Amino acid sequence: MNTIEHTMTWRVEVRPAIPLAMVPMHKELRVRGVYFILEGPQDGPHNPQAEHVIYIGKAIAQTIHKRGCIHLDTMTDARRANGNAKTGNSRAFKAYRTQAEFDHRRLWFVAGEMNPNKPWLISCAEGFLIHEFERRHGRKPKCNTNA
């Protein structure tokens, strides 16, 4: 039997939380890395393992800004002029959006910038954060389906 062992380190520069609705105005988020969406008022350190995290994602091919704008469109059910949805509307986000008490103004977006030249580390960081969330809470974040 062969054994392969490797230790990786990665760094995430976590930015302050902003309302999801304000993401389009934050052009400085045109970076690569991981991000998460939280529900409820945010007034302290932002922990991707907190119970009120509803989604953990990564931005490699697109920027964190672009991914945030797509999530905003999904959460607000944004439509094109022809009436079609602007986004693909994943089942998990659609189910979350149709909850009785849903209000997109209660959603906060936290960006974590990482080295764009090492996309594999961005994927590892996202996978680790989802795994740790699931380990702590016995489930994935509400809007992460097959992450």
Image: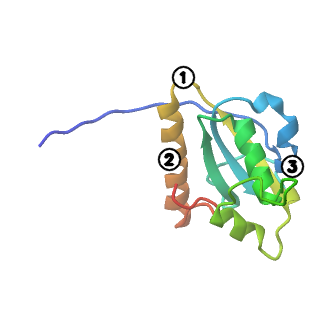
Q: Is residue 45 visible?
A: no
Q: Is residue 22 left or right of residue 124?
A: right
At label 2, the amino acid type is Gly
Residue at point 88%, 57% (across, down): 105
Inspect the image, locate mark 1, and give the three-letter code of the amino acid beneath it.
Asn
Sort mark 3 into few (<14), some (14-19) or many (20+) by Cα contacts within 10 Å. Answer: many
Q: Which residue is mark 1?
A: 117
**Point 52% across, 31% down: residue:** 119
The quarter of the picture where the N terminus appears is top left
Horizontal and vertical percent position of residue 15: 74, 35
Front disc: 3 or 2: 3
Quarter residue 141 falls in: bottom right
Callout 1 secondary element: loop
Q: How many C-alpha atoms fall within 10 Å of the one at disc 1: few (<14), some, or many (≥20)?
A: few
Label located before the other in sequence (1 or 2) = 1
Residue 145, given in percent of the width and then of the height, sits at: 56, 61
